[in-house]
Amino acid sequence: MAIDEELAARVRDRLEGLEGLGEKKMFGGLCFLINGHMVVAVSRRKGEGRFLFRVGKENADAAAGLGQSEPMVHGGRTMTGFYFVDADEVSEAHFAEWMSIAVENAYSLPPKP
């Protein structure tokens, strides 16, 4: 997987100016963090751009309602609160909702040192 700079710029535009924002290479792409907690990662795999949102367990129902997502599976285990979203198919309105839920989740957690 590789970092997709176009997708990264889309996320940066949405997160610009938020307190505690950071970036780190993770999950085979570029991860955006708030206060050390993951919000979203962007990557391109086999030509397909995708986002990996961390919305948290408490927001699973809200995430399911947005559709166009697939839960993250790692080592045969479903990672609750993490969802892949096809970046090339998600509407701007749904992208904004995913981002809002993920940002809210990150801010709800205590800052990491």
Image (cartoon, helix red, strand yellow):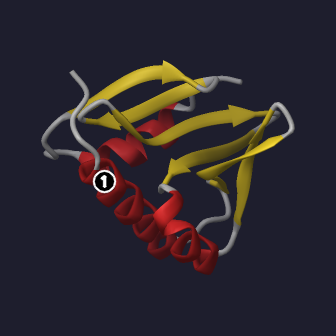
Residue at image location 58% in from the left, 47% down from the top: 51
- Residue 107 on image: x %, y %: 24, 51
Q: Is residue 18 left or right of residue 60?
A: left
Q: Quadrant of the C terminus?
A: top left
Q: How many marks?
A: 1
Give neighbour class at mark 1: few <14, some 14-19, many 20+ (Cα, 10 Å).
few
User: Residue 52 placed where, x, y %?
Assistant: 58, 45
Question: Of helix, strand and loop, which one carries label 1?
Answer: helix
Q: Quadrant of residue 85?
A: bottom right
Along the viewing direction, whichever of 45 and 77 lies nearer the viewer? 77
User: Up-down: is 92 above or below 76?
Assistant: below
Q: Could you say which is closer to the camera, residue 47 or residue 71?
A: 71
- Residue visible at 47% across and 69% down? 92
Q: Residue furthest bottom?
A: 65
Q: Is residue 20 left or right of residue 4?
A: left
- Residue type, label 1: Arg
Answer with the quarter of the image where residue 32 lies: top left
> Would residue 84 be found to the left or right of residue 56 on screen?
right
Residue located beneath label 1 in the image: 14
Which image quarter is the N terminus in?
top right
Image position, residue 55 (x, y; %):
47, 56
Q: Residue at x 13, y 45 (%)?
A: 17
Work out whether 9 lies above or below 29.
Answer: below
Q: Residue at x 23, y 41 (%)?
A: 110
Q: Is residue 92 left or right of residue 74?
A: left
Q: Position of residue 48 (x, y in %)?
A: 75, 43
